[in-house]
């Protein structure tokens, strides 16, 4: 233990002596958490809409008002000619075109049905799907209101009215959904990059030779390298949780101590993976590329931006070895759902097994040779 304490002292001295490293450890995670939480969202609040109103009746104008009054839409123009509106879209000046056909109001009052045309720019498929759902919802609400106001007898045939309650995120707030996942992502990046560059930095500076001739064991060396960055990453996590509580207003429904306990095991896994990469690489550039290779795959398949359930079966099988996916799931369950240990024990034991395996691999991989 005394030799490990000396290594810890050395590591902390090196960390706090490096003036360029301190902002990376302290400031950058906070800035990234705040920025990404506001920008990484599935909501689309600036949909540019142009209207081709070929009816010019109070009913058609009321439909247009339903769109312009929505917080998601911005009315960019009203045309009498469909060709002009289509040219507007081809120039990239609008995202959707709403076409109200002639006799729209008349058909509603006489034959009890009418139609509108909706053209959506689908270059971005996921965004187009969201915009389409917004527009269809507005049109359906407008249709139901027409039935209720003008045809009360027909309104009795409307579908059963339901009151919807969303558990664990009642307001469907994307901050509530994204912040726990982004917090996992940031502590992962900090932990993996710092640990993966650590041993390589010793190699480039030549100090690894001095460490190799000392009587410290390989386990003591790995422990001395892992513990300082574990403390730093845990401190970043605590700061992130405080930001989530006081900046974004996200309450930790579950036990914070359980969350920190699971995070501690997860960070052992991530830091051990970084140290393992560090023993493989010969330069810091190699270490950065290898770390980034694993991070890109792990992040994109973690369920942070796209649901794991929507992935192909073979991708879901590969995702069984993705530690970020496990911890994002656990973090959301504890923070939002209030899960207890029995709810997360299977995922926790998998993370613990991976962590133990990576500690063994990184220890065996380290060679006390120059």
Image (tube, grey):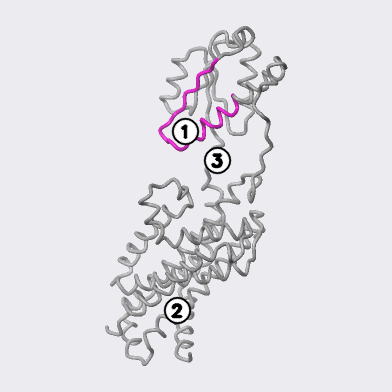
Can you tell which of label 1 and label 2 is closer to the viewer?
1
Helix, strand or loop at label 2? It is: helix
**Residue, disc 3:** 43
Helix, strand or loop at label 1? It is: helix
Q: Quadrant of the C terminus?
A: bottom left
Specify whether residue 66 is painted magenta.
no
Q: Earlier in the sequence, mark 1 or mark 3?
A: 3
Report the number of numbered marks: 3
Q: Examine the image and state in which quarter residue 256 appears.
A: bottom right
Most prominent secondary structure in the magenta stretch?
A: helix
Q: Nearer the viewer, residue 254 or 81?
A: 254
Q: Is residue 318 above or below residue 256?
A: above
Q: Which residues are magenta?
A: 115-139
Q: Examine the image and state in which quarter residue 14 appears.
A: bottom left
Helix, strand or loop at label 3? It is: loop
Q: Residue at x 48, y 84 (%)?
A: 9
Specify whether residue 126 is painted magenta.
yes
- The CA span between labels 1 and 2 is 50 Å
- The CA span between labels 1 and 3 is 12 Å
Q: Earlier in the sequence, mark 1 or mark 2?
A: 2
Q: Residue at x 69, y 20 (%)?
A: 155
Q: Nearer the viewer, residue 51 or 295?
A: 295
Q: Is residue 188 left or right of residue 338?
A: left
Q: In the rendering, which numbered label is found on residue 347? A: none
Q: Examine the image and state in which quarter residue 30 appears.
A: bottom right
Q: Is residue 304 above or below residue 133?
A: below
**Residue, disc 1:** 128
Question: How far across and down, in percent of the image, does residue 163 sit?
Answer: 69, 37
Q: Residue at x 54, y 68 (%)?
A: 262
**Residue, disc 2:** 14
């Amino acid at each position: 233990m005394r030799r490990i304490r000396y290594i810890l002292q050395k590591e902390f001295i090196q960390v706090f002596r490096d003036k360029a490293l301190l902002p990376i450890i302290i400031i950058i995670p906070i800035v990234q958490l705040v920025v990404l939480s506001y920008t990484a969202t599935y909501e689309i609040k600036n949909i540019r809409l142009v209207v081709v109103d070929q009816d010019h009746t109070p009913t058609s104008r009321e439909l247009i008002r339903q769109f312009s009054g929505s917080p998601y839409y911005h009315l960019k123009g009203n045309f009498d000619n469909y060709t002009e509106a289509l040219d507007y879209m081809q120039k990239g000046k609008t995202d959707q075109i709403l076409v109200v056909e002639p006799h729209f109001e008349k058909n509603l009052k006489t034959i009890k049905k009418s139609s509108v045309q909706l053209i959506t720019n689908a270059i971005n498929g996921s965004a187009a799907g969201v915009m389409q759902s917004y527009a269809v919802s507005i049109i359906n609400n407008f249709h139901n209101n027409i039935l209720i106001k003008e045809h009360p007898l027909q309104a009795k045939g409307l579908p059963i009215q339901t009151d919807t309650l969303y558990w664990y995120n009642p307001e469907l707030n994307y901050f509530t959904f994204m912040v726990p996942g982004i917090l996992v992502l940031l502590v992962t990046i900090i932990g993996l990059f710092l640990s993966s560059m650590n041993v390589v930095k010793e190699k480039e500076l030549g100090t690894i030779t001095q460490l190799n001739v000392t009587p410290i064991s390989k386990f003591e060396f790995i422990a001395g390298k892992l513990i300082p960055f574990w403390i730093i990453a845990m401190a970043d996590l605590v700061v992130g949780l405080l930001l989530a509580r006081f900046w974004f207003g996200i309450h930790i429904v579950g036990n914070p101590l359980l969350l920190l306990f699971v995070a501690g095991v997860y960070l052992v896994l991530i830091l051990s993976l970084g140290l393992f990469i560090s023993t493989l690489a010969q330069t810091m550039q190699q270490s950065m590329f290898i770390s980034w290779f694993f991070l890109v795959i792990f992040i994109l398949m973690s369920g942070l931006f796209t649901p794991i359930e929507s992935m192909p079966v073979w991708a879901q099988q590969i995702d069984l070895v993705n530690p970020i996916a496990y911890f994002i799931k656990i973090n959301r369950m504890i923070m939002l759902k209030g899960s207890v240990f029995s709810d997360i024990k299977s995922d926790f034991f998998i993370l613990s097994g991976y962590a133990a395996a990576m500690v063994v691999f990184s220890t065996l991989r380290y060679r006390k040779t120059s």
